[in-house]
Image (cartoon, rainbow, N blue to C red):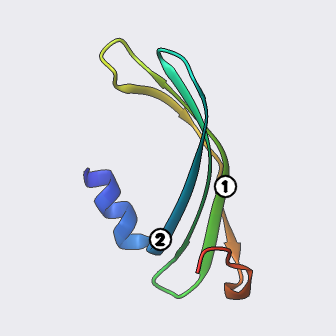
Amino acid sequence: MKFLTGKWEKELNYKLKKEYRAHTCTRIAVRFEYEYQNAAGLWFRAYGNENREFDENSYMAKRYASNDLEIAEEERKFK
């Protein structure tokens, strides 16, 4: 939870969209897009496929996702 608190303190006006793709007993795949604004007022978008793999205790063992891209305010999708 500490990670998310820090993340959302930096990522203002956060909007997220996720779409389920597939899963197995230890893996899940989703498609995601999100946008946020930083303290300087710049907008960013992250998008792609997110793949997670869980260990025998149901803790996340691996996660793969994309990087954030700076965008102009008029390029925002989620308003």
Q: Nearer the viewer, residue 17 or 52?
A: 17
Residue at point 39%, 62% (across, down): 7
| Disc number for residue 60 | none
Q: Is residue 66 above or below residue 16?
A: above
First of labels 1, 2 by sequence position: 2
Q: Is residue 33 above or below residue 37?
A: above
> How far across and down, in percent of the image, does residue 49 sit?
66, 42
Q: Is residue 74 above or below residue 11?
A: below
- Look at label 2 and name its amino acid: Tyr
Residue at point 34%, 71% (across, down): 9
Q: Is residue 37 left or right of residue 78?
A: left
Quadrant showing the C terminus: bottom right
* Other-residue count near label 1 (Cα within 10 Å), few / some / many at <14 / 14–19 / ≥20: some
- Look at label 1 and name its amino acid: Tyr
Q: Nearer the viewer, residue 53 or 23?
A: 23
Q: What SS does tag 2 mark?
A: strand
Q: Is residue 34 left or right of residue 59?
A: right
Q: Residue furthest top?
A: 56
Q: Is residue 14 above or below residue 79?
A: above
Residue that numbered label 1 is attached to: 47
Residue at point 54%, 17% (across, down): 24
- Tell me the quarter of the picture where residue 67 sits: bottom right
> How far across and down, in percent of the image, does residue 3 sit?
32, 52
| Label 1 to label 2: alpha-carbon separation | 13 Å
Residue that numbered label 2 is attached to: 14
Q: Residue furthest left?
A: 2
Q: Is residue 50 left or right of residue 25?
A: right
* Other-residue count near label 2 (Cα within 10 Å), few / some / many at <14 / 14–19 / ≥20: some
> How far across and down, in percent of the image, does residue 30 sit?
60, 39
Q: What SS does tag 1 mark?
A: strand
